[in-house]
Amino acid sequence: MTTKTMIPFEATHPGTVIRDEINARNISQKELAHELGVLPTFLNEILKGKRAITADFAILLEKSLGISADYWMRFQSQFEIDKARLKEKNVRRIELIETWNIIKEYVPVKHLKKSGYLIGTVKEDIIKIKDIYKVDTIENLVKTVAEHRTLSFYRKSEKLEINQTNMLAWSKIAEFESGKIIVPTFDASKVEQLKKDLSFVFFENSNVKARTKTLLENYGIKLIYLNKFDKTPIDGFSFWSGNNPAIALSVRHKRIDNFAFTIMHEIGHIDLHLKDNMERRFIDISGSKDKDTFELQADEYAQKSLISDSQWTEFVNLYKPFNDDKILEFGAKHKINPAIISGRACWERNNYAIKSMIDKTLN
C-alpha cells in the first residue's frame, strides 16, 4: 500500500520552537544567547529561520533547554525536506499555469467548461483535454490543432464566419463521446432496411431524435447529438469510431425535413465513402453552396433515400398543381412525411417562399 506524502502549507523552522520555549520559560533572547555562548544576532537569525541548526548548536540547546539534540536535528532535517517539497510543488504549479495558458490559445476552454467537460482543477482539466484530443503531450496538442485548422471533406460557406479551432474541438468531442458508445457490428448490407425504418420514423414524426438514435445504434451506427459552439455552423459529422461508423449532429435542427435530410446525407457518406475508407471524416457546414463531389453524392443519396426517383416522377406527373392537399395525399399514400415532400418541391423550384400550412416542426 502506497502512503501519500503530505506537504504542509509552509515549512516550519525549529527556531519557531526555540522562540516558544523562550516565551514559556520567561527568558529573553539575550539571556539564552549568553547561556549558549553565542552572539544575540546569531541566535536571532535562528529564531527567524534565517540560519540552520547545526549538530554543535543542537547539543548546546540540549544542555540548556533539556530537549535532545536528536530532536533538533530531526526538526531541522524535516524543515529542509518540507522546504524542498514546497519548492517542487510551486514549480509544478507554475508549469501547470504555463501549460494552461498555451491550451487557452488552441482550445475553446469556455465552450468545454460550458458543456461540462472541464469541472476539476487545472491539472485535472489538462488531463481531460489530452483525453478528448487523444494526445499525450501539450506539444502534440498544439501540433494537432495547427494541422487541422482547415478540415478536409466539409461544405464550405463564404457567408458564414467559421472558427476552425471551435470546429476541431466540436469534432473531437464528437469522437470522444462516440468512443463511450457500444453498438452491434455494422452490416453495410442492411443499410437499405435501415433507411426504410427511418423513413417511417420521419413519417410519424414522434419522438424522432430519440427513436432515430436507437434505430441507428441497433444497426451498428453510433449517433451523438451535440450543442454547437460559436462560429461552428455544423449540420452533421460522419466518421469512423472504433469498429463502427458514427454520426454527430448539432442540435440546431428544428424542422423534420432538415433533420431527415441531414441524417440521410450522413448515412450517404457512410454507405458511399466511409465503409471502405475508415480514415475519412466529413464535416458538413450549413448554408454551403460550393460543394465537392463527395457532398454532391451524399446530397443525391439523401434526396433519393427520402423520395425515390419513381415516387418523385409520380408526384410530378399525377399530383399537379402542387398544393398542401396534394402533398398530404401523396405523403399518406407512400408513408412520406409531407414536410419532406414540401421541402423537395421548394428545392426543385428553387423557391422557398411558397406558402404552405404543412407543419414542419421536428417532434
Image (tube, rainbow, N blue to C red):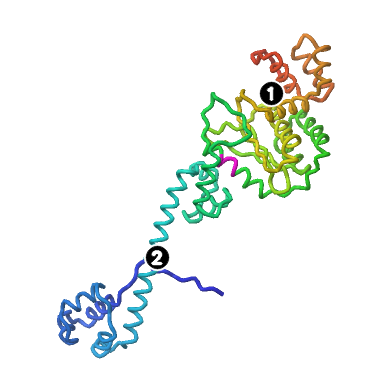
Label 2, secondary structure: give it: helix
Is most of the magenta stretch helix, strand or loop?
helix
Q: Position of residue 39 (x, y in %)?
A: 15, 81
Q: Is residue 279 magenta?
A: no
Image-based side of 129 in relation to 87, left or right: right
Please name the residue that numbered disc 2 is placed on: 88
Among the two numbered marks 2 and 1 on one chain, the one whose residue lies closer to the N terminus: 2
Where residue 8 appears, as percent x and y from the top left, is 39, 69
Q: Is residue 170 magenta?
A: yes
Q: Disc 2 vs disc 1: which is toward the camera?
A: 2
Eyeballing the image, is 340 above or below 47? above
Q: Residues within 10 Å of mark 2 (few under 14, many from 20)?
A: few
Identify residue for label 1.
360
- On the image, the x and y values in percent for residue 57 come to 25, 85
Q: CA distance from mark 2 to mark 1?
A: 62 Å
Looking at the rendered structure, the kind of residue marked 1 is Lys
Vertical side of 234 occupied by 28: above or below = below
Instruction: Residue 293: give its label.
Output: none
Q: Is residue 362 visible?
A: no
- Mark 1: which secondary structure? loop
- Residue 349 lies left or right of residue 109; in this view the side is right
Neighbourhood count class around disc 1 (C-alpha, 10 Å): few under 14, some 14–19, many 20 upward: some
